[in-house]
Image (tube, grey):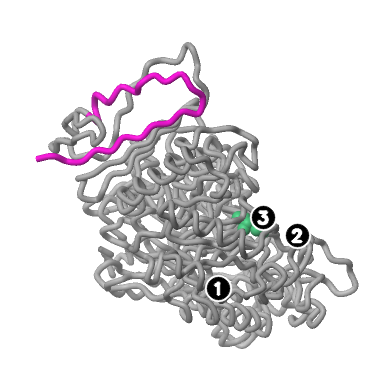
């Protein structure tokens, strides 16, 4: 609940296990007092000590002990004595960048409102959440700032966002508008971030924090595979199962910053939001600007506890639509099977084989439109290529549906090739700088989604295809980052709005299409997991985790991704060997076991499988169908961390703790390796569980505390899986 002491102007957001406290100080400054493990009551035991430290600047000449440079605050300004990273900065018509926000009021209500034009966590029922709005104002210029705090009490999550409103007479320009900032009065933390690259997303990185600023960000026009919009502060002793974690995840798919600053007195400021680099926003009188939302999770149960809070929230209160709680189809995608080189017969052969093996959805990937024989042409021309599919898309889709499986289709709607009818008709629609040569990526250009006409074209052209054929799944790809940033339609003083306007345009397009086609399952993709973020999950409830389908690489990529995102959101496919990305030969069983950690599918030429391989695939599909509900909607526990050694393991437990599936993957078979036991997690210690393969029965406590001996198998890349069910 949100407790407010109106006399002291003290606000206590009290979740199931978390407390977050702030107070209005004399002068109307909003101070941050506490964030961490829940307390029943907050009575101010951790008093702020006011002292004249280092001749720090003071807002009044009467009190040299009051300085914003040393006081923990909620939303910090620039130029008023706090020399640390500001949360926002506004430029006035006279060129001044100084503003002065003071508390003017607050409001609390049951529930949570949506954020205009932006993805955000939402409530299913009012009781899930309470929201506190704190109003700050710069009375000189009429700038009003609303700090939004929503508390998901049971899920124990706090979200923050900020709204700027110009209620004055002059034009203001936002130079920086972060979504949140938290001041900790200590620096005894380490920091976790997720870095990566194409084919190598979401690497787990843990480092001590030091004086000064440490930052991860993106200025690529997408959240990107390079750094995720995620940062966690943890204690030195924190591990997977114990210890404190403060985590922050931005619900945004564009340029972001996440900064951790340790100041001269070892206070730590964490801030996150839209990247202020190459950003500004004109705020005319009566205009407002809404920042994206940050999802903040505190856990004292280690990284596992943090992940499960994110997973629960994202399943219940971020993903939307018909597929939210539906188990997802096992798909077969033709990309790694054929790349651009296919015709109708080939597609039908693969689909037919998929259907025979038990797959439920065929996905036709890149290459079906325009004259796309390679990646140099045709993006933007969403018209079927009759050379490859002479009977058209509709007939192909119908034939596949008639086989008894669904049909899905790939698009890359945000892009245009120079060699396309779309570009020839509208050369001005791409993001570019007049009179300068283009910068290419995969030989393609990015459409300017800050423009309404471009967004309308995308909605129309994609809709036409989706309306014409029996399509029940769409893969929405995005394969290059944005350069030459600027929009032909914006005036000079608003050019730096382009990147955020692009995101607003993209979100609008996705909102329109997903609303118009509620029965279509959308999967987002950006050369794999290049835009795997909560912003995308709001519109599309699953994401292609990585173009790297090698089972061993995937243990790391999926581990990193699972830190924040639930298994059902992670597209995981079995592909051929030698693996196309790294050349590794791994057993089909291991490829299956690793892909079964998420949203399962295949991506290889099924017609080339041997009979023996087909039998294995068939068995995998049957098995996944049995465990699918559990994997997709159960609680994930990570056991061995692949970033730390030669092994990786995890188990997933059903919400009612009646069922469990566990997977173990070994990289190299090593002669001196210890004989290990695997201790499962999250079971009910009072329950008895039967190993469904051996029919042995063990107590939940024994499986968790004593563990199971891992059989010794002399084979590289070996893996195994255990399934347990409660017996009474
Ligand atoms: C990148 C995606 O990640 C792949 O799965 C595939 O769809 C290609 N694009 C197609 O160009």
Q: Which residue is mark 2?
A: 374
Q: Residues within 10 Å of mark 1 (few under 14, many from 20)?
A: many
Q: Is residue 503 magenta?
A: no
| The quarter of the displayed image where residue 85 is located | bottom right
Q: Is residue 395 left or right of residue 726?
A: right
Depth check: give the residue in front, 359 or 638.
359
| The quarter of the displayed image where residue 549 is located | top right
Q: Is residue 176 visible?
A: yes
Residue 342 is situated, as x and y percent measured from the top left of the image, at: 67, 59
* Disc 2: residue Cβ within 8 A of ligand 1's nearest atom: no
* Ligand 1 found in image quarter: bottom right
Q: Residues within 10 Å of mark 2 (few under 14, many from 20)?
A: few
| Pointer 2 or 1: first along the chain | 2
Picture layout, residue 265 above or below residue 514: above
Disc 3, SS: loop
Q: Which residue is mark 3?
A: 339
Q: Nearer the viewer, mark 1 or mark 3?
A: 3
| Pointer 1 or 3: first along the chain | 3
x 24%, y 70%: residue = 127
* Disc 1: residue Cβ within 8 A of ligand 1's nearest atom: no
Q: Is residue 21 visible?
A: no
Residue 39 is situated, as x and y percent measured from the top left of the image, at: 25, 50
Residue 601 is situated, as x and y percent measured from the top left of the image, at: 47, 52
Quadrant containing the C terminus in the rendered view: top left
Picture layout, residue 713 above or below residue 366: above
Q: Which residue is mark 1?
A: 507
Which region of the structure is painted magenta?
703-728
């Amino acid at each position: 609940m949100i407790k407010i002491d109106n006399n002291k102007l003290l606000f206590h957001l009290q979740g199931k296990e978390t407390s977050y406290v702030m107070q209005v100080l004399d002068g109307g400054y909003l101070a941050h007092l506490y964030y961490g493990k829940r307390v029943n009551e907050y009575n101010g035991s951790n008093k702020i000590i006011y002292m004249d430290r280092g001749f720090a600047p003071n807002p009044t000449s009467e009190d040299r002990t009051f300085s914003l440079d040393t006081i923990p605050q909620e939303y910090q300004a620039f130029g008023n004595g706090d020399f640390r990273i500001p949360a926002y900065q506004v430029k006035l018509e006279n060129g001044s960048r100084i503003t002065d926000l003071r508390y003017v009021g607050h409001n609390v209500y049951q529930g949570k409102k949506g954020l205009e034009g932006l993805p955000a966590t939402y409530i299913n029922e009012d009781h899930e959440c309470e929201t506190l709005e704190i109003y700050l104002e710069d009375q000189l210029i009429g700038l009003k700032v609303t700090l939004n705090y929503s508390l998901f009490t049971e899920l124990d999550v706090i979200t923050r966002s900020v709204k700027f409103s110009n209620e004055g007479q002059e034009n203001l320009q936002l130079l920086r508008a972060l979504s949140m900032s938290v001041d900790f009065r200590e620096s005894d933390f380490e920091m976790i971030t997720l870095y990566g690259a194409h084919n190598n997303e979401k690497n787990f990185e843990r480092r001590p924090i030091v004086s000064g600023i440490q930052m991860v960000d993106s200025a690529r026009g997408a959240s990107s595979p390079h750094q995720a919009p995620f940062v966690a502060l943890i204690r030195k002793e924190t591990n997977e199962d114990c210890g404190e974690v403060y985590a922050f995840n931005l619900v945004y798919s564009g340029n972001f910053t996440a900064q951790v600053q340790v100041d001269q007195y070892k206070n730590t400021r964490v801030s996150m939001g839209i990247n202020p680099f190459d950003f500004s926003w004109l705020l005319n009188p009566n205009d407002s600007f809404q920042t994206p939302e940050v999802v903040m999770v505190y856990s004292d149960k280690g990284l596992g506890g943090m992940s499960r809070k994110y997973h629960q929230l994202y399943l219940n209160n971020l993903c939307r639509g018909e597929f939210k709680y539906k188990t997802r189809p096992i798909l077969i995608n033709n990309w790694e099977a054929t790349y651009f080189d296919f015709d109708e017969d080939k597609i039908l052969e693969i689909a037919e084989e998929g259907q025979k093996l038990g797959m439920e959805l065929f996905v036709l990937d890149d290459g079906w439109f325009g004259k796309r024989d390679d990646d140099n042409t045709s993006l933007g021309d969403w018209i079927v290529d009759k050379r490859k599919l002479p009977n058209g898309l509709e007939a192909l889709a119908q034939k596949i549906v008639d086989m008894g499986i669904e049909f899905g289709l790939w698009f890359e709607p945000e892009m245009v090739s120079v060699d396309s009818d779309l570009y020839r008709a509208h050369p001005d629609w791409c993001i570019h700088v007049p009179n300068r040569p283009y910068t290419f990526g995969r030989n393609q250009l990015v459409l300017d989604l800050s423009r309404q006409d471009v967004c309308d074209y995308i909605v129309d052209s994609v809709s036409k295809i989706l309306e014409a054929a029996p399509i029940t799944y769409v893969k929405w790809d995005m394969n290059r980052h944005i350069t030459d940033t600027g929009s032909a339609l914006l005036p000079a003083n608003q050019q730096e709005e382009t990147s955020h306007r692009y995101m607003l345009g993209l979100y609008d397009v996705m909102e329109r299409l997903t609303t118009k086609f509620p029965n279509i399952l959308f999967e987002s993709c950006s050369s794999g997991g290049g835009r795997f973020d909560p912003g995308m999950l709001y519109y599309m409830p699953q994401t292609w985790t990585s173009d790297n389908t090698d089972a061993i690489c995937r243990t790391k990529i999926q581990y990193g991704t699972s830190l924040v995102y639930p298994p059902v959101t992670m597209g995981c496919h079995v592909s051929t060997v030698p693996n196309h990305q790294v050349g590794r030969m791994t057993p089909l069983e291991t490829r299956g076991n690793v892909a079964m950690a998420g949203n399962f599918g295949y991506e290889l030429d099924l017609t080339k499988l041997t009979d023996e391989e087909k039998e294995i695939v068939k068995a995998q599909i049957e098995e996944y169908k049995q465990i699918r509900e559990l994997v997709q909607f159960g609680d994930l526990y990570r056991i061995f961390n692949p970033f730390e050694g030669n092994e990786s393991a995890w188990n997933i437990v059903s919400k009612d703790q009646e069922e469990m599936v566990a997977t173990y993957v070994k990289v190299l078979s090593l002669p001196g390796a210890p004989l290990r036991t695997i201790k499962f997690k999250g079971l009910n210690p009072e329950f008895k569980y039967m190993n469904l393969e051996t029919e042995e029965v063990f107590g939940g406590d024994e499986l968790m505390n004593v563990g199971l001996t891992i059989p010794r198998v002399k084979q590289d890349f070996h893996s195994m899986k255990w399934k347990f069910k409660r017996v009474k």
